[in-house]
Image (cartoon, rainbow, N blue to C red):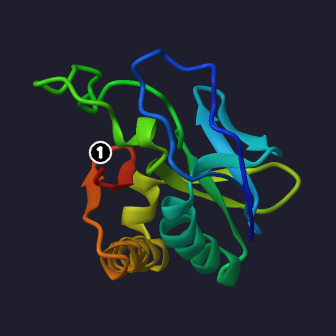
Amino acid sequence: MKITPARPRTDIPADAPVLRDPVNVVMDVPVFYVNERGPIRMFGPQYCERVFATSVLRTINAILSERNLGLAHLGIYNPRMARHANGDPILPPRWSNHAHGCAMDFKGVVLSGDVPVLVDIRAMRQDVKYRDLLEDAAAQCRASIISIQRNPEIVDEGGWIHVGIWP
């Protein structure tokens, strides 16, 4: 995995948090963004806060590399307010961990091949091999965040797992 310094984004709302130590991350595993059409391969770097890259993304990268799997997510950096899984705003309003560059919505894993095959959270829970991977990834991410003396925010949102560092 390669982590390089990045410039703070300027295309954000005026009152949005500014990342203190932004980085671009190129992971060793293939990365996919999941939308209504399925997993779409992302070839550019992932933009986030260095602390998130060196704890969560490094952990996920190692776990998935060992198993020759790709990462499927619904987003990492996004300068928006916090909201519930159904889209309702969290009250009182606060910036999302995504706006701090310290969160990812983990959607599942992608099997390698000519056509990417998404194994989503529901399917992962039904197969013991993937269920173990899911539990191991959550435990290792939690441990890596705690090891840097930060507070993990790992929340099962039903169709995805929110993995974040509390700001």
Q: Position of residue 9 (x, y in %)?
A: 63, 31
Task: Report the residue at 75% width, 48% height from top.
Answer: 45
Q: Position of residue 65 (x, y in %)?
A: 69, 77
Task: Report the residue at 50% width, 48% height from top.
Answer: 20
Task: Report the residue at 31% width, 31% height from top.
Answer: 95
Task: Report the residue at 64% width, 45% height from top.
Answer: 47
Residue that extends furthest to the top in the rendered view of this protein: 14
Please determine whether, in this image, residue 69 is positioned above or below residue 100.
below
Q: What secondary structure is marked by label 1?
A: loop
Residue that extends furthest to the left in the rendered view of this protein: 92
Q: Camera-side residue: 9 or 164?
A: 9
Q: Residue 159's quadrant in the figure?
A: top left
Work out which quarter of the rendered image holds the N terminus and state it. bottom right
Q: Camera-side residue: 66 or 14?
A: 14
9 sits to left or right of 41: left
Q: Residue 94's quadrant in the figure?
A: top left
Q: Camera-side residue: 77 or 140?
A: 77
139 sits to left or right of 35: left
According to the picture, the residue beneath numbered tag 1 turns out to be 158
Q: Residue 66's quadrant in the figure?
A: bottom right
